[in-house]
Image (tube, grey):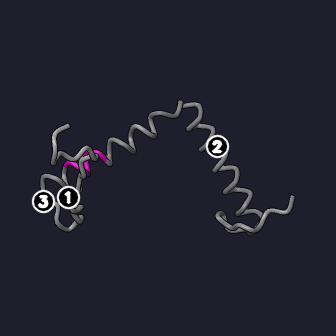
Amino acid sequence: MSDGQNSGTPVVIPAALAQPEEYDTAIRAALDHIDRQAVRTTADGRPASTRRSYTQDWTSWSKFCAASGVPVLAITSARW
């Protein structure tokens, strides 16, 4: 190494993050497309039998709650 050279690691300064209100129409459209694809991929990643089971479970739970007078999304601390 010759005199005056620095052997340190280069410093990378990231650009400031763009705020959503700064996105142009094309960026917003691209992000909307990505969001829709992510939702679809997540949903499609579960087997149909799993989705049917979830639906049946939720239906059973909803009926139980209605018959019991308990709100569907009511929670309490668990006491096991």
Residue 76 lies, in percent from the top left, at 75, 68
Q: Residue flagged by tag 2: what amino acid is it?
A: Gln
Q: Determine whether the residue tagged by mark 3 lies in a helix, strand or loop.
A: loop
On-image quarter of the C terminus: bottom right
Classify 10 Å Cα crowding around label 1: few (below 14), some (14-19), many (20 and above).
Answer: few
Residue that badge 3 annotates? 24
Task: Identify whether 9 is placed above or below 44.
Answer: below
Q: Residue flagged by tag 3: what amino acid is it?
A: Asp
Q: Do the numbered discs 2 and 1 sit on residues whose CB atoms are within 8 Å?
A: no
| Residue at x 12%, y 57% (from the top left corner) | 25
| Residue at x 59%, y 44% (from the top left corner) | 55
Q: Main secondary structure of the magenta part?
A: helix
Question: N-terminal of the two: label 3 or label 1?
Answer: 1
What is the total number of numbered labels drawn onto the structure image? 3
Classify 10 Å Cα crowding around label 3: few (below 14), some (14-19), many (20 and above).
Answer: few
Tell me, yes or no, whether the highlighted magenta stretch contains residue 31.
yes
Residue 12 lies, in percent from the top left, at 23, 52
- Tell me where the magenta segment starts and ends, as one range: 30-34
Q: Is residue 77 left or right of residue 42?
A: right
Q: Nearer the viewer, mark 2 or mark 1?
A: 1
Q: Nearer the viewer, mark 3 or mark 2?
A: 3
Residue that badge 2 annotates? 56
Query: From this viewpoint, which residue is outermost toward the front?
Result: 3
| Residue at x 63%, y 38% (from the top left corner) | 53
Q: Determine whether the residue tagged by mark 1 lies in a helix, strand or loop.
A: loop
Q: Which mark is residue 35?
A: none
Residue that badge 1 annotates? 15
Q: Between marks 3 and 1, how big is the CA–CA gap?
A: 18 Å
Classify 10 Å Cα crowding around label 2: few (below 14), some (14-19), many (20 and above).
Answer: few
Task: Identify whether 19 is placed above or below 33.
Answer: below
